[in-house]
Amino acid sequence: MGLFLFKRLITLLATLAGASVVVFLVLEVLPGDAAQMLMGPDASPEAVQALAVKLGLNLPPMTRYWQWISGLLVGDMGISNAYSSPVLDLVLERLAVTVPLAVIAMLLTTALALSTGIYAASRHNHIGDTGLMGLTQIGIAVPNFWFAIMLILLFSVQLQWFSAGGFPGWDEGFASALKSLLLPALSLAVVQAAILARITRSAVLEVLREDFVRTARAKGLSQRATLWGHVLRNAMIPVLTVMGLQFANLLAGTIVVENVFYLPGLGRLIFQAISNRDLIVVRNCVLLLAAMVIFVNFVVDVLYAVIDPRVKASDI
């Protein structure tokens, strides 16, 4: 197990290093002048040049890349050009919204998808299976921003059970903050749950055809006990793969939903930083999201080995 974790950790670090290079190079080739954007179109060339020198934009790319990475290694993300405050403080403030939103959405996704997928598999080729798979097909086709608008119209405008947007902050009370995240989380979870339910159904159906399932049933186990005690664990590897990718997507793909609900999350910060040409914020936020995706995939690999020891053995 130690060698397995070591190899996965080396892969994680190498992927992070490659991601940092890609993020830096992509932002380097973007058109436009950050100093000119910050100073405005009427600024004199001398003032723009002075700001570029102050921000280090006149330095060679390799020097700026090393300054950026060496700062990250000691927890220094630099100072935002637009907000004139440490980028780390901005990121931590926004993560307090984005991470809970992604976690709530993932919990809703898992609960809906596993129950739906297992039920559909247990009713294979019956009306329950056909009806649920039809609903999941609709869920996959519906854009989450459109579903978010529909939720606002129903629960905020018509029923007035929830606010249409905004985030009161965790200091105003856990219940109030959680309530403001439920509709955004639901709008994110619907599409992901539809995808995961279909994957779960397929994986469960494949395991149900195995000999050990017939043996368990022949020993007198009920269908429910067989499904939850034997089938589900053996079907979890493809399900975990999709769950890991989905959670990473939820962390990295909240920009649209956060703007629809006017949530001060990381996605909205990236959107504002792009509009302000605040490249240091964009660079750090994009790398942070990439690091989250890479770390989630690392956790999924470890869970593979926990659930199915054959994965660890074959890798070693």
Image (cartoon, helix red, strand yellow):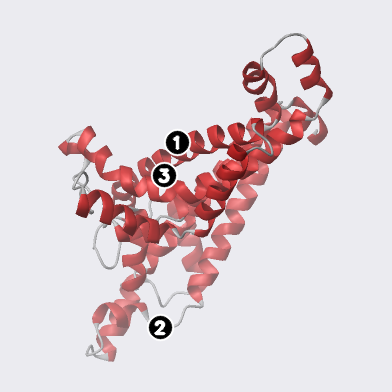
Question: Pointers 2 and 1 in contact (CB under 8 A)?
Answer: no
Please tell me whether residue 165 is drawn above or below residue 115 in the rendered image. below
Q: Nearer the viewer, residue 99 or 181?
A: 181
Q: Nearer the viewer, residue 150 or 38?
A: 150
**Residue 189 place in picture, x, y as percent:** 45, 46
Q: Is residue 33 above or below residue 182?
A: below
Per the rendering, the mark at residue 32 is 2
Q: Position of residue 13 (x, y in %)?
A: 61, 46
Whether pointer 3 and pointer 1 mark residues with C-beta atoms closer than 8 Å, the reply is no
- The residue that appears at 40% across and 55% down in the rendered structure is 254
Q: Amino acid at mark 3?
A: Ala
Residue under label 1: 107
| Residue type pointed to by label 2 | Gly
Q: Residue furthest left?
A: 172
The amino acid type found where label 1 is placed reads Leu
Among numbered discs 3 and 1, the one appearing first in the sequence: 3
What residue is shown with label 3? 102
The quadrant of the picture occupied by the C terminus is top right
Q: Is residue 50 visible?
A: yes
Relative placement, left or right, of 157 versus 148 is left
Mark in front: 3 vs 1: 1
Q: Point out residue 16 in the picture as x, y percentages from the top left corner.
A: 58, 52
Closer mark to the observer between disc 2 and disc 3: 3
- Categorize mark 2 by other alpha carbons within 10 Å: few (<14), some (14-19), many (20+): few
Q: Residue furthest front?
A: 127
> What element does badge 2 sit on?
loop
Q: Secondary structure at mark 1?
A: helix
Say few, some or many: other residues with alpha carbon within 10 Å of mark 3 (under 14 / 14 to 19 / 20 or more).
many
